[in-house]
Amino acid sequence: MPDERPASTPPEPAAEPSNEEARSPEDERIRLAAYDVLLQSTAKVVEDTSEQLRQLASLSTAASGVALRMMLTGDKPGDSARAMAEAQRSLQEAMDVFQRIGRVSIQLMERFQPVPSSPPAPPSEPAPDDEPGRKP
């Protein structure tokens, strides 16, 4: 004999709050504080790398100047040319590293940039009698 009970349907799952709804003001404050720390750390890395690049550029310029003087005086011109090439290569490698750090910094900041928990209200339009230049 067939079972005449209606087929049971599984209960519908309770609606879960979205990430936007689940954030409390405290969660938002913590998230913004964490982003601020990330921002400061990234800025420090870029600043330190900039300083290292500046120092390497100064060293490379000085080494190239000494090598050029040696070349002009005929003192080991082959070694001088290699020293200049090495100074230029080192500086180029440092600039490549600096660019990579910049790209990674931008990616981090974009990836973890906080999204406002609610969209800002659109600007209100002035009422017709609030128009500039119009006298009441």
Image: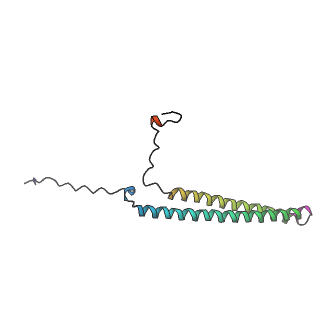
Q: Estimate the x, y position of residue 31 in percent, counting from the top left.
A: 46, 62
Q: Is residue 131 left or right of residue 67?
A: left
In this view, the residue in front, 123 or 19, is 123
Residue 82 visible in the picture:
no
Q: How many marks?
A: 0
In this view, the residue in front, 124 or 110, is 124
Q: As drawn, which residue projects farthest toward the right?
A: 73
Query: The magenta stretch spans which residues?
Result: 71-77
Q: Estimate the x, y position of residue 58 in percent, counting from the top left.
A: 77, 64
**The magenta stretch spans residue 73:** yes
Q: In the picture, residue 28 is in which quadrant? A: bottom left
Residue at the spot 51% in from the left edge and 62% down from the top edge? 35
Q: How is the image coloured?
A: rainbow
Q: Estimate the x, y position of residue 95 in percent, counting from the top left.
A: 69, 59
Up-down relation of residue 133 to residue 12 (above or below): above
Q: Is residue 22 left or right of residue 5?
A: right
Q: As drawn, which residue projects farthest toward the front?
A: 136
Q: In the picture, residue 50 is in which quadrant? A: bottom right
In this view, the residue in front, 73 or 132, is 132
**The magenta stretch spans residue 57:** no
In this view, the residue in front, 61 or 38, is 38
Q: Quadrant of the N terminus?
A: bottom left
Residue 46 visible in the picture:
yes
Q: Estimate the x, y position of residue 106 in percent, counting from the top left.
A: 57, 57
Residue at the spot 16% in from the left edge and 53% down from the top edge? 7
Residue at the spot 58% in from the left edge and 59% down from the top edge? 105
Q: As drawn, which residue projects farthest toward the left?
A: 1
